[in-house]
Image (cartoon, helix red, strand yellow):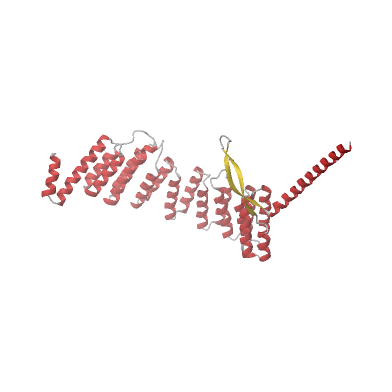
């Protein structure tokens, strides 16, 4: 009641600053009560620190952050640390951006890194923010040491990417190469790492090194996105004007996969200026069509024919376009019974679209003719048996 009377008095007789101070005092008391009851309520600490940043002195802001970061999560489980870590990050950003004290911000990051149990888990963003702060402090040695320690204790892809970007900005190509070697030792399956390394070598004019890297990359047993790697290798050879090398790569890739997009890309390549011409492109399209037909891949054949028709419209004449269109299928709506994957029970009918190709229909008609002939023979045999029984 006394506090309410004080607020009422200030509203009646006080000025604007006095009223604001009363409200701030009340808010501080509420936040102090919240964090006292639950020191691990990090959201309340964030709000408390924001209140002090907007209205308080630097000493009060630092006091709130110091009190907040002292409440270390009791369990060494990463999900419990995610909100806590941002208290340190916000603290460091306050010191750097508001107080312009880069040295104190660096100390905040270092203390945070000392607290994190790196043997259990780590946070790449903290390492990166700390290293970049050292760059802004013009202390490259400290930045490199931070990144190097991060690779040893954290080893995440972000660390390698940011460290390499720093060295590349500084023009240290040899350091970038050393980092890429360590990067690929740690993650030999990472296709993006191989592509970035190859792009680096190409950007500095090392064509043979770039080609050797691509060759080494595609020979890896396990890759996360091999299609990106092969595409990068083929595009590299095309841009270098090495059409024969690109053709060999397409053939090697088709030995590994018969995906329709590879066939389409191969045929389109042959139709370009660096390829062998439109006739060779048509031969590739025809090879692909027969291969997909043998494998019974109807939707893939439709995609191939669509690409083939577009190619003929730009490179062929009316007769070649008509020849491709003659291969186009009819789309027919059908029904089939759906079954439950777990129990195998029938769950109802579903509609789907099927494709009937003209060359498939020829084979089907031949089969129908054989069935019709067999049915006629059976009818004739039955008539002969009836006539024999009547004569008896």
Q: Residue reaching furthest bottom?
A: 317
Left/right placement of residue 5 relative to residue 324 reads left
Q: Residue reaching furthest top?
A: 74
Count all numbered tags in the image, as a single digit: 0
Does 274 appear above or below 256? below
Left/right placement of residue 126 relative to residue 224 reads left
Observer-nearest of 380 and 329? 380
Observer-nearest of 357 and 385? 385
Q: Going 69% across and 52% down the picture, which residue do you hit? A: 290
Residue 219 visible in the current orientation: no
Q: Position of residue 354 (x, y in %)?
A: 62, 50
Observer-nearest of 65 and 326? 326
Q: Going 27% across and 51% down the picture, which residue do you hit? A: 98
Left/right placement of residue 52 relative to residue 171 reads left
Q: Going 34% across and 49% down the picture, which residue do you hit? A: 133
Q: Quadrant of residue 70?
A: top left
Q: Position of residue 238 (x, y in %)?
A: 58, 59
Q: Position of residue 251 (x, y in %)?
A: 65, 52
Left/right placement of residue 195 relative to residue 167 reads right
The C terminus: image quadrant: top right
The N terminus: image quadrant: top left
Residue 158 visible in the current orientation: yes
Q: Position of residue 260 (x, y in %)?
A: 61, 52
Observer-nearest of 277 and 340? 340
Does 278 appear above or below 45? below
Q: Residue reaching furthest right?
A: 391
Does 171 appear above or below 49? below
Q: Going 43% across and 41% down the picture, which residue do you hit? A: 152
């Amino acid at each position: 009641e006394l506090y309410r009377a004080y607020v009422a008095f200030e509203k009646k007789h006080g000025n604007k600053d006095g009223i604001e101070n009363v409200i701030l005092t009340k808010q501080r008391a509420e936040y102090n009560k919240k964090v006292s009851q639950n020191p691990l309520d990090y959201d309340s600490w964030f709000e408390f620190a924001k209140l002090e940043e907007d209205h308080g002195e630097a000493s009060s802001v630092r006091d709130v952050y110091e009190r907040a970061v002292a409440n270390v999560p009791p369990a060494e489980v990463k999900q419990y640390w995610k909100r806590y870590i941002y208290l340190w990050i916000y603290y460091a950003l306050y010191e750097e951006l508001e107080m312009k004290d880069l040295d104190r911000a660096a100390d905040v990051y270092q203390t945070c890194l000392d607290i994190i149990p790196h043997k259990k888990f780590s946070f790449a963003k903290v390492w990166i923010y700390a290293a970049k702060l050292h760059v802004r402090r013009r202390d490259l040695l400290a930045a490199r040491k931070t990144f190097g320690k991060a690779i040893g204790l954290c080893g995440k892809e972000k660390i390698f990417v940011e460290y390499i970007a720093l060295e590349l900005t500084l023009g240290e190509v040899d350091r970038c190469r050393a980092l890429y070697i360590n990067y690929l030792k740690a993650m030999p399956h990472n296709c993006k790492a191989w592509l970035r390394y190859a792009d680096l070598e190409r950007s500095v004019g090392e064509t043979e090194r770039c080609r050797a890297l691509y060759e080494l990359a595609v020979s890896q047993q396990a890759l996360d996105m091999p299609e990106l790697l092969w595409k990068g290798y083929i595009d590299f050879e095309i841009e270098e004007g090495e059409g024969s090398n690109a053709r060999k790569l397409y053939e090697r890739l088709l030995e590994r996969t018969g995906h329709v997009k590879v066939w389409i890309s191969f045929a389109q390549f042959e139709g370009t200026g660096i390829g062998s011409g439109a006739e060779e492109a048509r031969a590739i399209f025809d090879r692909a069509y027969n291969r997909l037909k043998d494998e019974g891949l109807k939707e893939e054949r439709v995609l191939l024919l669509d690409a083939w028709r577009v190619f003929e419209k730009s490179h062929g004449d009316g007769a070649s376009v008509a020849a491709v269109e003659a291969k186009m299928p009819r789309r027919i709506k059908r029904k089939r019974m759906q079954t439950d994957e777990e129990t195998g029970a029938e769950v109802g009918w579903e509609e789907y679209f099927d494709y009937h190709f003209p060359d498939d229909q020829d084979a089907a008609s031949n089969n129908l003719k054989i069935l019709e002939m067999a049915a006629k023979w059976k009818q004739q045999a039955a008539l002969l048996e009836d006539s024999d029984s009547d004569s008896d």
